[in-house]
Image (tube, rainbow, N blue to C red):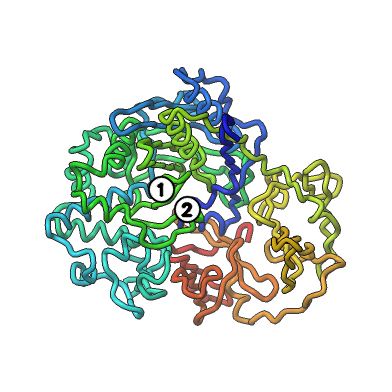
Amino acid sequence: MPGLAPRVVLDLREFMGNLLDRRTFLSLGGGAAISAAASPRLWGLDAVPAPAARDEVETRLDDFTTNYMRAMNAPGMTQALTDTKATIRTVGYGFANVDLKTPVAPEHLFQIGSITKSFTALIMLQLRDEGKVDLHRPVLDYLPWLPVNMPYGPITAHHLLTHSSGLPDASGIFQSDPAARHVQGFAPGAHFHYCNLGFVILGQIIEKLDGKPWYQCLQARILTPLTMMQTAPVITIDSSARSAIGYQPFFDDQVYPRQGRLAPRPPEVFASSAGSIAAPPGDMAVYLRMLLNGCHGIVSTDGFRLLSTPYIQATAFSPSAYYGYGIAVDVLDGHKILRHTGGMSCFASSIHVDLDGGVAAFASINAMQGYRPTPVTQYAIQLLRAQREAKPLPVAEAATDAREVDNAGEYAGTFRNSNGKELLFKAEDKRLLLVDGARQIVLQRNTGDSFVSTVQGSFSDYSLTFGREHTNSKTAKTADGTTPPAIPSPVVEVGYGPDWYVNSAYRGDREFTVPAAYGPLTGHYRSASGDDVRVFVRKGLLWIGDTPLTEIGAWLFRVGDDSWSPDTVEFLTIVEGRARLLRVIDEDHLRIEVGS
């Protein structure tokens, strides 16, 4: 209706599609949950003076940001807003150091993760402008030593830049086994499959053609020309001294409830052309402004066109998103935007660049809990654009409390396993409760029909995943030709790790054949970097965390449901009836016996 401000719906569960990157997948293997709960947080955010808002836009954004941080249990956030001419605002919320109660300040570095990929793409486009690289030439022409098997066809820089090479989402080129090769899973260009490995390879091409390490190329070609002099091209102990403290789940081998306990992570060293930049908000405003202005002075007009062309659909970012070169290309409220997220061990970031509206936003939090602050940057550009166009400011809905389960009654009831053990679920006031003896555990929605316990140490090794009755019936259209909303099929089962329970309405199979070879593979594994995974059998299938595995070879399994996925797990070194080593994509995990 005319005169009414538009409402911006920001259901946090809808914005977790930022992407399931490799680090997040590994944490899910250990049972980490991605969800939101608007319960009191641990950080005492209200103790930090609120930023000084100059107008209604900043007031609304501050209110939304602080509410978002409480809901998502974020220790601190840095934020930058810009238009095509100048930085509008840089601001910090919460704490850079919780123990010392140090507020986030404009000089604090935050790790931007995979937003780094757009920097790498720009360097490749510079080399193209200089005639030093052909983006459609096979990468083996530049790096003949690459340990890659390509049964589906040659891979080019274009494929790497668009995540369509068919390579697995590994974090590095070289593996612990010198004979190991990364194996292509589909024909180049056929699918979008997020791939950190591809951008690590691009970094090697840059080093080869520019004659110096990638991070020095980044400094000389991007950071210095843009006067981003406070930005660290790689994460080092020295740069960590200028950084906000990063936080991660304290119990990293269990599922993580949104308001769970966090712990500081020690400084780390990380250098990768896929994601190792740490920057303050002022420098990120400069970078976003460069993108708003068509990368003027950094790449040619044609180079920017290539960067921002939507080549391949990338629904991991949004249902309407495509991927360009190192950045997602999308449409928001009819405007063309560039967007990306970044996830590190203990930082999560987001950018939105409204090319048509001439405004952009950056946000980063100093914790890794599975989500990205995408709602914040999206709402920021919608506010700024409305202000510039003299339109009513959009109204953002409050963050969703993941403990509120509107359909809790669908999961209520008693479920039993083959040994007679029962799980009892109750629905009370939009809460789903698991009855554990005399105690009732509030469950928090993960995604869909998956939930996690909010009580650490009680049902916190795995997610609780409900299953529904499978039906093939189609919803009939009404007399006016419309299709009514589908009625969910009844919930009939629930899985908790290797345990499987059914209710009285279950009519399916109850006995499953388990290959004898699976027995030695089940157990608890952990990597040197602290990634924790549990492998078990349920309903005849082998699982890693919440993800089913498909056998494709001797002790070799594909991850997930896509038949073309190149991501695999491999069990190695079977000794005395147990696998002792598990390779998840490219990272080695050793069996541990405590808590298996």
The crowd level at tag 1 (other Cα within 10 Å; few <14, some 14-19, many 20+) is many
- The quadrant the C terminus occupies is bottom right
Is residue 575 toward the left or the right of residue 281 in the image?
Answer: right
Q: Residue at x 27, y 32 (%)?
A: 230
Residue under label 2: 317
Residue receiving disc 1: 340
1 or 2: tag closer to the N-terminus: 2
Name the one closer to the observer, 170 or 61: 61
Query: Total marks drawn?
Result: 2
In this orientation, does residue 365 appear? no
Query: Where does the N terminus fall, quadrant-wise?
Result: top right
> x, y (%) of residue 26?
51, 57
**Alpha carbon distance from label 1 to label 2:** 8 Å
Pick whichever, 45 or 345, lies toward us. 45
User: Where is residue 463 drawn, in percent x and y?
Assistant: 67, 56
**Helix or strand or loop: what does disc 2 sit on?**
loop
Query: Quick check: 102 left or right of 520?
Result: left
Q: Relative to residue 170, is residue 85 drawn left or right?
A: left
Is the Cβ of the residue at disc 1 closer than 8 Å to that at disc 2? Answer: yes
Residue at the image position 48 percent from the left and 63 percent from the top: 589
What kind of residue is marked 2?
Answer: Phe
Measuring from the top left, give residue 555's x and y in whole percent. Answer: 52, 78
Location of residue 350 with respect to 560 vertically, above or below? above
Residue type at the position of mark 1: His
Q: Mark on residue 55? A: none
In the image, residue 574 above or below residue 38? below
Q: Is residue 336 above or below residue 551?
A: above
Which picture quadrant has residue 207?
bottom left
Name which residue lies at 82% across and 58% down.
Answer: 423
Residue 312 can be seen in this image:
yes
